[in-house]
Image (cartoon, rainbow, N blue to C red):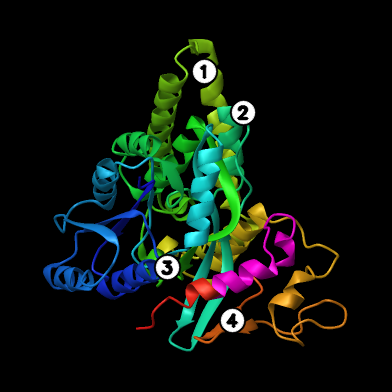
Amino acid sequence: MTLHTLIIPTYNRPSDLTRNLRFLDAQGLRSKVLVLDSSAPEARAANQAALADLRLDLEYIEYPVTLHPFDKFADGIGRAQTPYASLCADDDLLLLEGLQASLAALEAEPEAVCAHGYYFLFGFLQDAQNMDLTTMLYASPSIDAADPIARLDRLMASYQALTYGVFRTGVLQEVYGFLGRLGGLMFRELLSGALPVLRGKVLRVPEFYMARQHATGDDAKRTRWHPTEWFMRDAPELLGAYVEYRGVLLEALHRWTPDADAARMAVWQRTIDVIHLRYLARHFPDAVVDVAVDHEIHGMGIDDYWSSPKLQNSLLEAHNNSFAPPPAATPLACWIASAFPAGAIDARGHVGAWPLVRTTEVRHYRFYGSLIDERLSGVVEIDAAQIRQLCRSLDAYPPD
């Protein structure tokens, strides 16, 4: 029996989709694959051509170009008939070892609704000879407290999206049923993480799970998708949208805990507000506020400074610090010396220079300090064997 359905939405990125499918095929993926295509006609034709000669168990489904992405996701998720399902962006790379470990974790833990491993960024350099592996993106610990509100607090304290985790299919379908109640990207994404942790435990397995491409710069052009940008643009609108989002959370809680009385629900509402204050506060470090105030008092608005390097770098640093402990006094773990060539680690056990390069028969993999970071030593469980396996897996990633 097929255990898992992989759902790949795509929109006008035929080259990315082609590489993604070829990579999955080369790894020997045995999941059912659903490709959800709302591309323009020319890209749609290229996508259809890419399906030829693949050994994947694949179903191709077409949608109107104008369909909202979340509506497309919901329809695709509703078609899944396997016990487990997950989404994968058309330009990301799902690693088979991480998928298998996630499925095994869900099979072993009936109270868990979602499992996933470590996400990292790759690019900008990616060709037949080289591949940059730059940043550990998502690696926070499992969210496995017994109390649902405590789990929500852990999610928001170091928020990392659950969008691409492996879910029990029924839970994922239920979650996306709620998502249709909200408009806009930000609170739909938050809801797609908050609802699962209210429903059950979310497990982090110690395996590389997904490689995500560096943003192309389009994110800086969006509006009302990031809490900092939205608050600075229109705080009352953001807070109004939050109240609507909170209402959906409370409705779901009431459905899943029907014995809770009105007094208990009132306590939960207040607690949810405080929990989300923690989430919002993390997006307003002093350096970000300083940039905003300096521009605003000189008559410039959010569109003038949102993409400034100082502001964006401060937000990135706040994200990285949210799940990593302070830097350790000890040098990098000794396993790094066995994963990379002689001379990469000096006599004191420190890295001589970044990036560290591991070379296979296919290409050079350049590992950067923000991927293998001393601060993550108490959070991320990686060893030399996993580094070697990661490179072997990525050898199957085809160049343009």
To which quarter of the image does residue 91 belong?
A: bottom left
**Residue at (43%, 52%) from the top-left corner?**
164
The part of the chain drawn in magenta is 373-391
Going from N to C along the chain, the mark reached first, 4 or 1, is 1
Q: Amino acid at mark 2?
A: Ala
| Res 372 seen here | no
Q: Is residue 266 magenta?
A: no
Residue corresponding to mark 2: 146
Q: Amino acid at mark 3?
A: Gln
Q: Amino acid at mark 4?
A: Arg
Residue corresponding to mark 3: 27
Going from N to C along the chain, the mark reached first, 3 or 1, is 3
Residue corresponding to mark 1: 266
Classify mark 3: helix, strand or loop. helix
**Residue at (51%, 68%) from the top-left corner?**
121
- Asked whether the beta carbons under mark 2 and mark 1 sit within 8 Å of each other, the answer is no
